[in-house]
Amino acid sequence: MTIFQSILLGIVQGLTEFLPVSSSGHLVIVPYLLGWDIPAEVEFVFDVLVQVATLIAVIVYFWSDLMGIAKALITGIKKRDLFEDPQSRLGILVILATIPAGIIGVIIKPLVEAAFASPQATAIFLLVTAGLLIIAERAGNRSRDLSQLNWIDALWIGLFQALAIFPGVSRSGSTITGGMLRNLKREPAARFSFLMSIPIMLAAGTLATFDLRNIADLSSNLLVFIPGFIAAAVIGYLAIRWFLHYLTHRSLYVFAVYCIFLSCLTLAVSLIRG
């Protein structure tokens, strides 16, 4: 991997982790379309590092919210009432929403990644993401805020997060769809999606980091990976900020159209290359 590839893929990760277009899908498709033959071991290490970078981005962006939730949870534990304070209640719902994806991920994610981490399969799953975004716009009435969220909503959205186990199915896209199908407004649905991404990304990043110990010559590639790490963190932060503002005024249709376009382009290239 070159420094240019590292920076470009870091930018791609930062953008697509939070926009509803699938970061895992782009990290498969972009090198394929550009004809980059990156060794699997190098690609694995890089993917882990840029995912950690976007985790840092979402934590930094929501730092005040997370501190408010943490303080409210501590107070709730002392008072033996975790649902009195809205912030504490939100924290419990975020934790509850991560359970379905956590359980399903541990059971089947390695099998899914081994079977479907290909450009062609990823392109097909991008069409699933497009379908979810269209359904969200057409089926939800967008009348509720986060203050009206309940435990059924949290588990429902958590089940949608489990769909992102498939490469090409956007985690943010699927969870925002889940929220909008429970009649959340777009921006609150995205905000909850980003908050609930933190525990699952933290757990996945921790597990993946342990795997890095078995990688040979890890330190020799760090100078190449660092620019991509920085790019992913900075672009990820800016993407969250832009996307939440975007959703207060506009729909998700443009992202559905993009997913369809990228899927068709990838499948066409695959057919041409044989």
Image (spheres, rainbow, N blue to C red):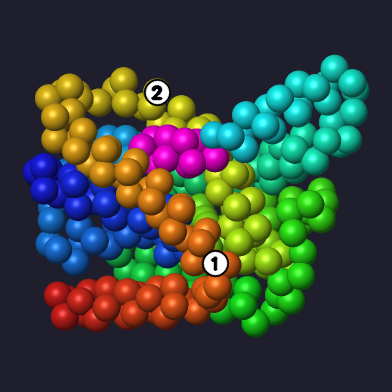
User: Closer to the N terminus: mark 2 or mark 1?
Assistant: 2
Tag nearer the camera, 2 or 1 = 1
Q: Residue 39 falls in which quadrant of the image? A: top left
- Across and down, in percent, residue 256 comes to 46, 76
Quarter of the image containing the C terminus? bottom left
Q: Is residue 62 left or right of residue 80?
A: left
Query: Few, some or many C-alpha atoms within 10 Å of disc 1 (few <14, some 14-19, many ≥20)?
Result: some
Q: Is mark 1 on a helix, strand or loop?
A: helix
Q: In this view, does 127 lie above or below 182?
A: below
Q: Is residue 253 visible?
A: yes
Which amino acid type is marked by label 1? Leu
Left or right relative to 104: residue 6: left
* Amino acid type at mark 2: Phe
User: In the image, residue 96 lies at what x, y percent?
Assistant: 73, 41
Q: Distance between the residues labelled 2 and 1?
A: 37 Å
Query: What percent of the width, then of the height, locates residue 114?
Result: 39, 50
Name which residue lies at 44% across and 59% down: 242
Where are the magenta residues, as a range?
A: 52-62
Occupied quadrant, residue 257 = bottom left
Q: Which residue is drawn at 55% across and 49% down?
A: 194
Q: Mark 1 points at which residue?
A: 247
Q: Determine which of the numbered discs, if any, sits on residue 210 in the image.
A: 2
User: From what the image shows, is residue 32 above or below residue 220?
Assistant: below
Residue 84: give its label: none
Q: In the image, is residue 231 part of the stretch drawn in magenta?
A: no
Q: Quadrant of residue 2?
A: top left
